[in-house]
Image (tube, grey):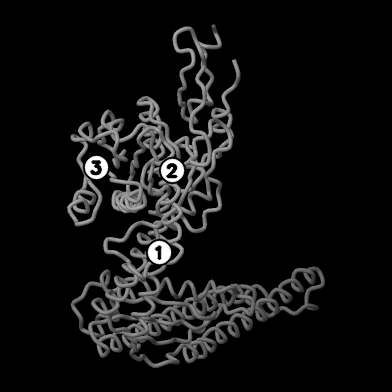
Amino acid sequence: MTTSKTSESSAAAPLLDLQALVVAVRRRRRLWCSMALLGLLVGAAFAVLLPPPSAAVTKVLVAHREDQPNDTGTLIRTDVQLLGTTRIADKALRSLKSPEKPEDFIQNYRGTGLTNNLLQIDVTGGSDAEAVARAKALADAFVADHVERMQETAKAEAQALLDQRDRMRDELAQVNKAIGDRSPGSDPKASASIESLFARRAELTSRIADFDQRAAEARTGTPKLIAGTQIVDAPRAVRHSLPGAAATNAAIGLVLGLVLGLALAAVGTVVADRPVLRREIAANLGASVVAELRHAPRRPAGRWERRRTRAARTRLTASLARTVRGSAEPVSLLELGCARSTSVIALDLAEALASDGPVVIIDGLPGPQLADSGRKPGGPTVVSGERAADVSHEERRFGVGSVAPGAAWTDLQYLGTRTVLVVRAGHGSAAWLHTVARQLADLGIPVIGVVLIDPDPRDRTDGTLWDGPHTALRGNNERPARQNGTDRGRTEWLPMWAARVPDSDQEAR
């Protein structure tokens, strides 16, 4: 048994085709453009309907006793954390005589360390005056707390030095008492001990003087630090620009909406699995793409219709007319997601065939497009699918139907035994395209070509099937079937996916 080419190609295919994903996302530009526009409008509306609260700012110069040139900002970060404590908040609220809780007030301000010694305080309030008053109360409370902590630290350090000095004085008194009235040379036998006592007294005297000096320096350094901690930028209200805020919020909303729209489009594309590229549609239907058209507008475009679109419609009409004239069997047009475009193609085809004689269109479309056109003077004869059997075989006819979900598959053979599929790109899922191909194959209706509606203009893939039976309009659409004892000489059409799969029963024979 030979290996299936389809299985090999499926195994080698990537799990995610980036080209198809990009094309499908680009085709859904209405979605992500709408999301981007919605984000822009919502952002601008937030700036207008929810303006920022009144705010004030002040700056405090904080002097530290432990300041070092190589400090990495540890001290100022400590000050920022101290500013956010209930102790500072409570002092500020007391000066404001506000009944607000410190825990709630902390949520309305924040501190930022600009440098190692510069602290910025941002405060919000119900009005500019209230915000400025809160900023001043917070700055004063922080400065007072910082000064109080430095004074307590200096006082505790000086007291520790003085306590140590007093202990040294007590020890010096004991040494003086031990020396008494003796001198180093008064008693030769005890001269060594006396000399050690005199040395101890000199050492204690020096250390006592050192402790006195250090205690004095501790007291002296505090006023410098107190004078260095002060408000250097008086509290002031922060002015907000409504146009600037609206522009900023709109830009942020635009970006977020665009990102969300692209994400939704990408996820929807992967989940839906709707082929867009020519090669995917041709491979799933088992037939080559023979023409491409833009979708038919709801209103006639008239002279404003693009020249390229008119030329493409003319070429397609001429090709279909040659096919219908040269076919001994009735031909049908089956649509998938483009009933209006299919009806326009059918009317163009009927107009091209009118020169040969009366033309009858068998209408199997779910909508009234063809039925309304058939009532117009000079229009083609349009009959419903139920009256297809009443049409004379001498009249030239072709059918128009649908292979959308819910289609009556058994009625398609009355529209025509050969068909041209008119498929809108990105409309049907890959599973449904397979279903269409299999149903038509079971009915024995060969697909002689696919007309692609609304293709991607940047699609450069090949929609022609080069292997398997030639089912395009350019060549033969039938091939001899495998002959057996009962069906010798019968011709049978097999779809592309069926032609690739080997017949295990036939080869077993």
Task: Report the disc number at residue 332.
Answer: none
Mark 1 Cα shell of 10 Å, populated few (<14), some (14-19), many (≥20): many
Residue 268 in view of the camera: no
For residue 227, above or below residue 475:
below
User: Where in the figure is residue 6, as x and y percent of width and height?
Assistant: 54, 29
Q: Which of marks 2 and 3 is in front?
A: 3
Expressed as whole percent of the image width and height from the top left, the position of residue 347 reads 30, 52
Determine if residue 127 is in view: yes
Circle 2: element type: strand
Amino acid carrying label 2: it is Val
- Decide: marks 2, 3 in contact (CB < 8 A)? no
Label ID, residue 258: 1
Q: In this view, does 94 lie above or below 395?
A: below
Disc 3 target residue: 363
Circle nearer the N terminus (2, 3): 3
Q: Which numbered tag is attached to residue 450?
A: 2
The quadrant in which residue 4 appears is: top right
Among numbered discs 2 and 1, the one appearing first in the sequence? 1
Residue 293, placed above or below residue 422: below
Q: 383 or 420: which is nearer to us?
A: 383
How far apart marks 1 and 3 lie (CA) works out to 43 Å
Left or right? Give the position of 140 relative to 196: left
Can you give x and y, in whole percent of width and height, for residue 85 in the image?
A: 35, 71
Which one is in front in this view, the residue at disc 1 or the one at disc 3?
3
Say which quadrant the N terminus sits in.
top right
How many numbered discs?
3
Residue 414 falls left or right of residue 257: left
Residue beneath the point at 25% across and 32% down = 408
**Amino acid type assigned to the residue bearing label 3 in the image:** Asp
